Structure formats: structure tokens, C-alpha cells
Amino acid sequence: MKIYPAIDLINGKCVRLQKGDFTKVTKYIVSPVDVAQQYQSEGAEYLHVVDLDGAKSGGVKQTQVISKLVSSCNLKVQAGGGVRSLKDVQLLLDAGVDKVIIGSLAVKDMELTKAIISQVGAKAITIAFDLFVDEAGVMEIATHGWQSKSDKNFKEVLENYIHQGVDQILCTDISKDGMLVGPNFSLYEQLSKKYPSVCFLASGGMSEASDITQLKEKGVRGVIIGKALYENRFSLSEVIHVN
């Protein structure tokens, strides 16, 4: 299982949001580089970085910070937030990231996104979907830092990118994000069973080490862990070898 500890950035500082709400920000007095190096010391192989300034306003805003993160550790870094163009993708690849996360653009402009994938290769891209999931399991896609909803069908958009060769998909249940209430197990189990060739990254709600074990048992191949690590709900070393 791929374990991605997460670093969310606002103005170069580590933060966490609740349900994507920019008015509910928790700031942490620790440098992103120190956090990344600590994760590496605990056995991490991967790192998930989100530029929340870019996600909110569009365009990659914190390339220098991300580049410093990449050069300070030996982790495979996937980064995104505000990616709106091939130039943005190239900036992040030039900064040394392993994969670029494309979120809102993948929903708003599928033709441009497909052109970018053709240019840089599907292996360099993680497509990210932020989802509002109702009690009946109906999924709506959120865009632009979770500030807007799309009327596009989630599964149709998803399958479009799978058919293009993208094999890593990040799905965040917004209602769980930053809440420490446990992930949406049924969502990730359903997706992993329907599309077994895809590495789905579960994101949102991780609260205890057993969450990661349960996801693995349900066939989920990757997970993003953010606030639970900052709040010391469990250590990365407790879950890093779940396989």
C-alpha cells in the first residue's frame, strides 16, 4: 500500500482545513522541510503536497517551497493545487516532483487535461477528485478549492482518464476531510473493486491506525494521511508497513 503523509501549504506554512473551508484553518508551528524529513525518518517513501494558495486562486503559487521540499528529502513527492495549464505542470515537474496532481482542471477542461497527459505521460499525473457524497452515495464533484460544484458525472469523467492510461486517482470525501472521524470505507472499496487496475488514494478522515489496515483489507492501494499525524493520533511508523 502506498502511504502518502500530507503537507498542506498556505504562504509556505503547514496548515489543515476542515471540510475544505478556508475560514477554518489550523496552523502548525513547524517548517514543511522539517515535517518531510521527519516523515522520511519514520520510513515514508512518498509525500503528498498541496498548494492551497494555488487551489484557491488558480496557478501554482509555491513552487520554490515545493522545490526545497523535494531537494531536502528522498521521497517521491506528488504535488498539486492550482494546476491550470501545461506550464503549471511543467513547473512542478521541473521542481522535481514525481507526480503532478490535476484536480479542478481535469473536470473543467478535459480536453486540455488530456493534451497535458499526452505531453508529459500518464505516469507523471495523479488525477484528483474532491467529492460531496450524500447519504444515498450520490457523488458530486467539487472544484476550485472545494468552493464550487460541477454538474459533470463523476464516473464518466473518471473513466475518461482511466482509458487514457492514468493509473493513480485521488478521491477525497470532503465531509470527512480534517474531521478525524474515519474515512468513507464504502466509497473506496466500491471504486477499488470496480476499477482494479487503478491505485485509488483514499483521502479524508483518517483518525487511527486501524483505518489504514481496514482500507487495505478492502482492496484500497493507497492512502493520504494529514491531520491525524499532526495531531499525534498515531505515528507514521505504525502504519508505514501495512501491506
Image: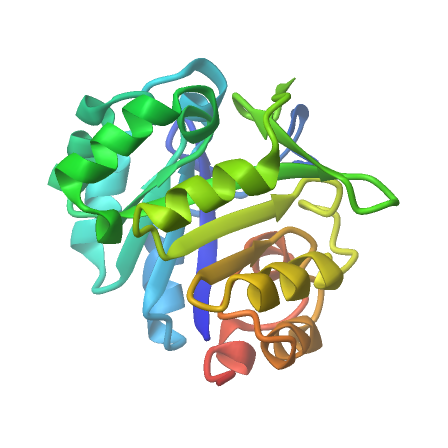
Name the spot of residue 62 as percent of width and height, x first.
Answer: 30, 29
Q: Is residue 80 left or right of residue 56?
A: left
Q: Which colour scheme is used?
A: rainbow
Q: In this view, does 37 lie to the left or right of 17?
A: left
Q: In this view, does 95 lie to the left or right of 156?
A: left
* 188 vs 193, nearest the viewer: 193
Residue 94 found in image quarter: top left
* 25 vs 180, nearest the viewer: 180
Q: Is residue 176 left or right of residue 31?
A: right
| Residue 95 in view (yes/no) | no
The relative height of residue 153 versus residue 22 in the rendered view (above or below) is below
Which residue is the extreme one toward the top? Answer: 57
| Residue 220 in view (yes/no) | yes
Name the spot of residue 61 as percent of width and height, x first.
Answer: 31, 23
Q: Which residue is drawn at 34% across and 63% down?
A: 46
Q: Residue at x 42, y 66 (%)?
A: 197
- Disc tally is 0
* 12 vs 151, nearest the viewer: 151
Name the spot of residue 190 as percent of width and height, x first.
Answer: 67, 62
* 81 vs 35, nearest the viewer: 81
Q: Which residue is drawn at 16% across and 32% down?
A: 90
Which residue is the extreme one toward the right? Answer: 135
Name the spot of residue 199 as percent of width and height, x first.
Answer: 44, 63
Q: Which residue is drawn at 31% across and 46% down?
A: 164
